[in-house]
Amino acid sequence: MDLFSSKTIKNILPFDGITNYHGIVLNKKQCDFYYQKLLETINWKNDEAIILGKKIITKRKVAWYGDSAYSYTYSKVTKTANIWTKELLELKQIVEKESNETYNSCLLNLYHSGEEGMAYHSDGEKMLKKNGAIASLSLGAERKFSFKHKNTKQRVDIFLERGSLLVMKEGTQANWLHRLPPTKKVQTPRINLTFRTIIL
Ligand SMILES: O=C(O)CCC(=O)C(=O)O
Ligand SMILES: [Fe+2]
């Protein structure tokens, strides 16, 4: 951000990492437009994973997009990425400008209600650029997002507002886990986009 901007970007982690909350970067009209477009045009699939040797299928839907139809392995299942849509390229451009970073791929998650979430993990797959920024853009329902330090177990909670951007940078994946806790308080869907740099 430039010197004359009134917007404050804050590192929400107390130590061992930088995760900047940029606040709301899309206005209500943009949020409504992109939320609806993504629901309709993204090649949503239920996620498959192998956990403790068992194949499970999540209720949450996912989709990978990027510069090329690369293969990737996530939770021990290999899939092929889709090529950027028009709207994803527009969102990528907004997020790149706001975060002052570049990205070549995006994982989208669709949570149908508060009952769907994501367990504690860090995004440290081999194919991801080491210490590369991961930019998380949220649409739809506001949800709580939690970090937990891998050693001290200290927790940091933040509410990800509709249209907000959270950028996880150096130290975050190495030292902290994050999750989207399930909640009975939210009945409406949420779409999250995490823009990443993978080594192609
Ligand atoms: O839905 C979110 O806010 C986070 C998703 C996430 O952590 C991931 O896709 O790796
Ligand atoms: Fe993650």
Image (cartoon, grey):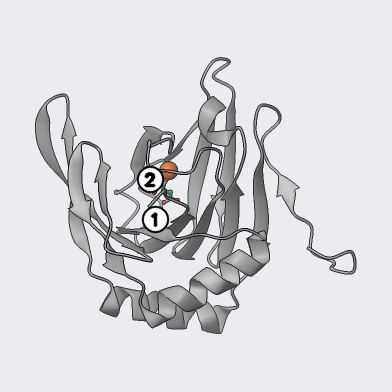
- Is there a contact, CB below 8 Å, between mark 1 and mark 2? yes
Asked whether mark 2 and ligand 1 are closer than 8 Å, the reply comes as: no
State the image coordinates of residue 21 (x, y, percent, origin top left).
65, 52
Q: In which quarter of the image is the N terminus?
A: bottom right
**SS at badge 2:** loop
Q: Is 54 on the left-hand or right-hand side of 129?
A: left
Q: Is 129 on the left-hand or right-hand side of 84?
A: right
**Above-or-below relation of 118 to 51:** below
Q: How far apart, in angstroms, are the residues tagged by discs 1 and 2? A: 6 Å
Examine the rendering and report whether any part of residue 48 can be seen: no
The residue sitting at 67% across, 58% down in the picture is 22
Of 175 and 14, nearer the camera is: 175
Task: Name the amino acid type tagged 2.
Answer: Thr
The residue tagged 1 is 186
The residue sitting at 79% across, 57% down in the picture is 8
The residue tagged 2 is 183
Task: Name the amino acid type tagged 1.
Answer: Val
Of 47 and 112, nearer the camera is: 47
State the image coordinates of residue 86 (x, y, percent, origin top left).
40, 82
